[in-house]
Amino acid sequence: MSWQQSFYTGMLLLVAASPCALAIGTPAAVLSGIAQAARNGVLIKGGVYLENMGTIKVMAFDKTGTLTEGRFSVTEILPMNGSTAEELLAIAAAVEQQSSHPVAAAVVEAAMEKQLSLPRAGNLENVAGKGVMSMIDRRPVLVGSIKLFQDTDWYSLDKDLEDTISRLEAEGKTTMAVSHDGKFLGILALADTPRPGIHQILDKLRELGIQKLVMLTGDVTTHP
């Protein structure tokens, strides 16, 4: 007999000889899958959710700490409008030392390595997905993405600033524009590194039928 005929005949025999075993086979396999996932730190609410994973075509990931190591370092300090690199970094670090975000920690670490004296900053306000606002010498300080300044009425963005930020972000870097008392002090560029093996994991997901992989960040949504 051909393979198809042999398989069909075998299934007929199993259905006739052990219908109960066949009926319980699927839920047993599902429960086994849930248990195995739990052993590896993945919690699945129930069998229907596990089965639904087979229909997933789009998967979204957080970036920092998920796709990347979550350990940033300052790669470029670009002062503007007559400010110095030390002034730019000190102002940014004074504000960011009030935050626990990995990007903030990298800025503070860079300032400490240069042994900079940081001014006193206060009244930190987080602007979700955009950056932070604070006060130094009773004058406002803004540190964050270009969206933070686009949404702030008293700022007029310079084309050179926007072009520089676009170039750095095209290189895969995270950018932070810094201003004090309405004056742009410059831009900080930071870089994070992908987690080991993340490229192979994304490739494997594509092989499994995921058609689109989406990366979610505080600044932009892209497709890795």
Image (cartoon, rainbow, N blue to C red):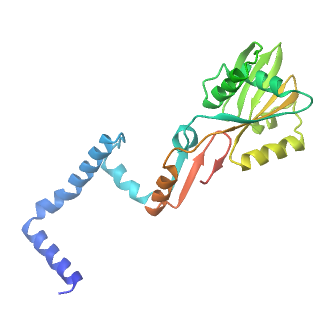
Q: Going by the picture, which residue comes out furthest to the front?
A: 114
Q: Is residue 20 visible?
A: yes
Drawn side of residue 120 relative to residue 15, left or right: right
| Along the line of sight, the residue nearer the viewer: 6 or 12 | 6
| Along the line of sight, the residue nearer the viewer: 196 or 96 | 196
| Location of residue 161 (image quadrant) | top right
Indicate the quadrant containing the N terminus: top left, top right, bottom left or bottom right. bottom left
| Location of residue 96 (image quadrant) | top right
Residue 98 location, x and y as percent?
Answer: 66, 19
Residue beneath the point at 66% across and 27% down: 104
Drawn side of residue 173 relative to residue 51, left or right: right
Residue beneath the point at 35% across and 44% down: 44
Residue beneath the point at 78% across and 22% down: 91
Drawn side of residue 18 relative to residue 216, left or right: left
Q: Is residue 57 visible?
A: no
Question: Up-down: is 120 above or below 18?
Answer: above
Q: Going by the picture, which residue comes out furthest to the right?
A: 82
Question: Up-down: is 213 above or below 164?
Answer: below
Drawn side of residue 30 relative to residue 182, left or right: left
Q: Going by the picture, which residue comes out furthest to the bottom?
A: 1
| Along the line of sight, the residue nearer the viewer: 175 or 73 | 73
Residue 9 location, x and y as percent?
Answer: 15, 79
Residue beneath the point at 89% across and 44% down: 159
Q: How many marks?
A: 0
| Location of residue 72 (image quadrant) | top right
Question: Up-down: is 215 above or below 186?
Answer: below
Residue 194 location, x and y as percent?
Answer: 56, 45
Residue 45 location, x and y as percent?
Answer: 34, 42
